[in-house]
Amino acid sequence: MAYDIGIKTVSLDGFQVVQRKYFSRLTEPMMTIWESAVAFNTASHDALNNCECIEIYVNEKAKSIAIMPVPSKDKEAVQWIRGSKKYKYNRIECTMFARQIFKSWGLDPQYHYRTPGKLVQCDKKLMILFDFSHYEVWSGSKMVKENG
């Protein structure tokens, strides 16, 4: 038995899918890089179970940065939670590293760059991978343009 419930059939011709990048990213891991510093948002800390230290990996050719939780005693550990653990968006000063990235990737030092991260696994270890071949360009708190 069929019922007519009054639903019309429509065509999606002429419609476009709205990309998710136009919606809030508060729950998505994000990394920002300035010419003298890097920062990770609260969602990045949450994704790595609020660990106190990370190890940072860079792939200059792929324009990617990966971070992995490590114990504070690890030789290359970077503390990324300072002060109150409630406020976890910490800017980490790293002028030599950041300038090298800007030079290698051809980034303009008058701007800062932001990209979302994805949880990945390598050798059964959880990491966040940030792909800077696709990024947003920012000037202050205003997005200037997107690349990719």
Image (cartoon, rainbow, N blue to C red):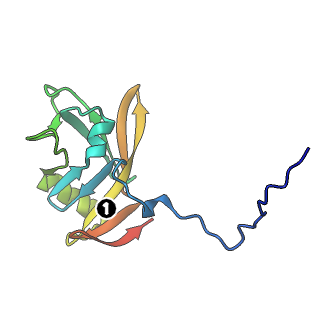
Tell me what residue is drawn at x 26 percent, y 49 percent.
41
Q: Is residue 91 above or below residue 17?
A: above
Instruction: Quarter of the image for the N terminus: give it.
Output: top right
Using the image as rendered, state which of residue 25 and residue 127 is in the foreground.
25
Residue depicted at 15% across the width and 29% down the height = 75
Vertical position of residue 127 compared to residue 117: above or below: above
26, above or below 142, in the image? above
Q: Amino acid at mark 1?
A: Trp
**Can you tell which quarter of the image residue 139 is in?**
bottom left
Q: Is residue 57 visible?
A: no
| SS type, badge 1 | helix
**Mark 1 lies on residue:** 105
Q: Residue at x 16, y 55 (%)?
A: 37
Residue 17 image point, x, y percent? 59, 64
- The number of discs equals 1
- Give the quadrant of residue 143: bottom left
